[in-house]
Image: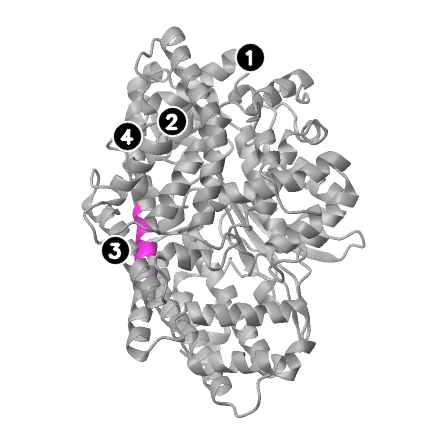
Amino acid sequence: MSENQLLDNPLLDFSGLPKFDRVKAEHVTPAVDYLLSQGRELLETLSTSSIAPTWQNFAYPLEDFEEKLSRAWSQVSHMNSVVNSPELREAYNDNLSKLTAFYADLSQDERLYKKFRDLKSSPEYSQLNTAQKKIIENELRDFRLGGAELPDAEKARFKVIQEELSSLSAKFEENLLDTTNDFSLILKDASNLQGIPADVLQAAADAAKEEGKSGYKFTLHFPSYMPVLQYADNRDLRATLYRAYATRASEFGKPEWDNTSLIKDILKLKQESAKLLGFNNYAEVSLSTKMAGKPAEVTDFLDTLGKRAKPFALRDMQELKEYAANKLGLRELEAWDIAYASEKLREEKYAFSDQEVKQYFPESQVLHGLFKVTETIFGVHVKKSQAPVWHADASFYEITDHQGKLVGQFYLDLYARNNKRGGAWMDEAITRRKKIDGLETPVAFLTCNFSPPVGGKPALFTHDEVNTMFHEFGHGLHHLLTKVDEYGVSGIKGVEWDAVELPSQFMENFCWEWEVLRHMTKHVETGAQLPRELFDKMVAAKNFQAGMQTMRQIEFSLFDIRLHGDFDPNGPETALDLIEQVRDEVAVVRPPKWNRFPNNFSHIFAGGYAAGYYSYKWAEVLSADAYSLFEENGVLSQETGQRFWSEILAQGGSRPALDSFIAFRGREPSIDALLRHNGMTN
């Protein structure tokens, strides 16, 4: 690769925002090879230097290189998730293995490990700022967890394990994406589609038309799948889609997309890596970097929450069964009936439907309301801007302070489509840090999978989708409103995984405030604001089946922590056996035996939530308790907002999350606010 070609590679241009209008799959390998070559030279220079390590001559150059590599790879990873193609997938997988090997070597380099130990014991250490000290502490911990203290033979094995885990996790996600994309059901006419909302039918008709077919095309992408489960009167149709969704990436589909063996292999490798590091199991490894220090703390938390929630869950389920039998003629409530019967029951109890509410939430109004909350409590301004994007659906925004100074920027990609992985997430594009030539402004990716505009109307969001939008924006604010200048603990970096959901779940609370919601609603046909009467019904229904939903999350969390704890992946029991055991203990809604939930549980097998799924509930405790201070001082209190910014968002990972929470709330967190918010108090 010539120097001119390297200079022309958009992935190596760090002068500003990503050049998404120029990035192609062919750019990935040359950019990664070049950066890794530069990295190896730097590591060799630093590790062999005879000069005593300081922050400026040792730690900062490492951070500077890590930022460049991370920034380039974040573009590749993001595009692989949102505009996946065979060429991009191949480039991603080929280079993922190189990156994994590089980081495995780095984390095991005894010379670098010693340099960090020397830096910590040097006179300079006491003069460093809090963020710099925290980075050094984190580095020392990560070297130990990376195998730096292992004998050479075990180091080599540990490195192989990390490379294999990286590859298997990527394959797990690909299988799930391919299975989801592969399924479609085209119905020739609307005779079996009663109950399904008109906008969903229009989207299904448009999808069929795009393929040159007549009729209605339904898929397993959530905006298509969920309305069928929730509204379709045709029980067989609900059952067909439910079975396809619940058996994704399993033995019931194409063998090459079956995740069953991957689950076993991933668990075996994680257990082996934990044993090499001297831990009893992988759960202990995972929790060594989290607020909850030991698996017993997690199970105690889940047990305590479960005992408080289960009576409410049982009451929810009994009510649903009686309603389904008496009003819907469903004597046996099957898994594909739950969402349908629940929606009917909610409509009857509270006299409104999700579809009715949805008409008041066009995209532009939701974003206006979201930005207004942000502007009010944090004293910033959000406005649309321009930047190259990867797809016509994506847009770009910037946040400025009250003086007009740029604080951060973010991309929005809101609609579901083929070749885009499901779910919603925030990721880092550029991280705030102080450089020699100035301050780097943070940039975030915010991605959702909502229904796109249909029939010439704007995109309409359900209230659940509005919650999701606020949730992901909370993650974005955590990244964008940091005031930490050191890369390694700026924004969400260095934040304990079980606290990283605090700002996101905190932001969801505003979706239930009239003072907020009335500014973000406008009926798509009439332009009318959401009626207060309808809002009151929504609030009354807010905790509808909260007990069932809580027990479902506890089920997933217990499965995860036990799977990575005492479960023996080399034994006769399978992950499927384990989840059935967990369901015996806690499940209120029991799925059919052929449900293959573990095969599509990408959070723990392809994401960062292994032995950490409990963190959604853990952080929900933190967020509910944090929000209670706003309830006390005024939900749009700028004074409280500024305190949340300075003590939580601004701090990033520069200090323990518990310290940040106490600094904001004035005490340790309590479970009571969560139970109260969920209506689970007697």
The three-letter amino acid code for the residue at tag 4 is Arg
Q: Secondary structure at mark 2?
A: loop
Asked whether 173 falls inside the magenta stretch, the response is yes
Query: How many discs appear?
Result: 4
Q: Which residue is mark 1?
A: 351
Q: Give the Cα separation between the discs numbered 1 and 4.
A: 30 Å
- Magenta stretch: give its range: 166-175
The label on residue 264 is none
Locate the N terminus by quadrant: bottom left
The three-letter amino acid code for the residue at tag 3 is Asp
The label on residue 243 is 4
Dot placed on the residue nearer the N-terminal end, 2 or 1: 1
Quadrant of residue 33 in the image?
Answer: bottom left
The residue under the point 67% across, 35% down is 369
The three-letter amino acid code for the residue at tag 2 is Val
Residues marked 4 and 3 touching at CB (< 8 Å)? no
Q: Residue furthest right?
A: 403
Q: Secondary structure at mark 3?
A: helix
Nearest to the eye among marks 1 and 3: give it. Answer: 3
Residues marked 2 and 1 touching at CB (< 8 Å)? no
Name the side, left or right, on which 480 lies relative to 20: right
Whether residue 57 is visible to the viewer of this picture, yes or no, is yes
Residue 322 location in percent, x, y?
A: 40, 11
Q: Give the Cα separation between the discs numbered 4 and 3.
A: 26 Å
Q: Which residue is mark 2?
A: 588
Position of residue 213 relative to residue 253, above or below, is above
Position of residue 287 relative to residue 254, above or below, is below
Residue 343 location in percent, x, y?
A: 46, 19
Q: Which residue is mark 3?
A: 265
Q: How is the image coloured?
A: one colour
The residue under the point 33% across, 12% down is 330
Dot placed on the residue nearer the N-terminal end, 1 or 3: 3
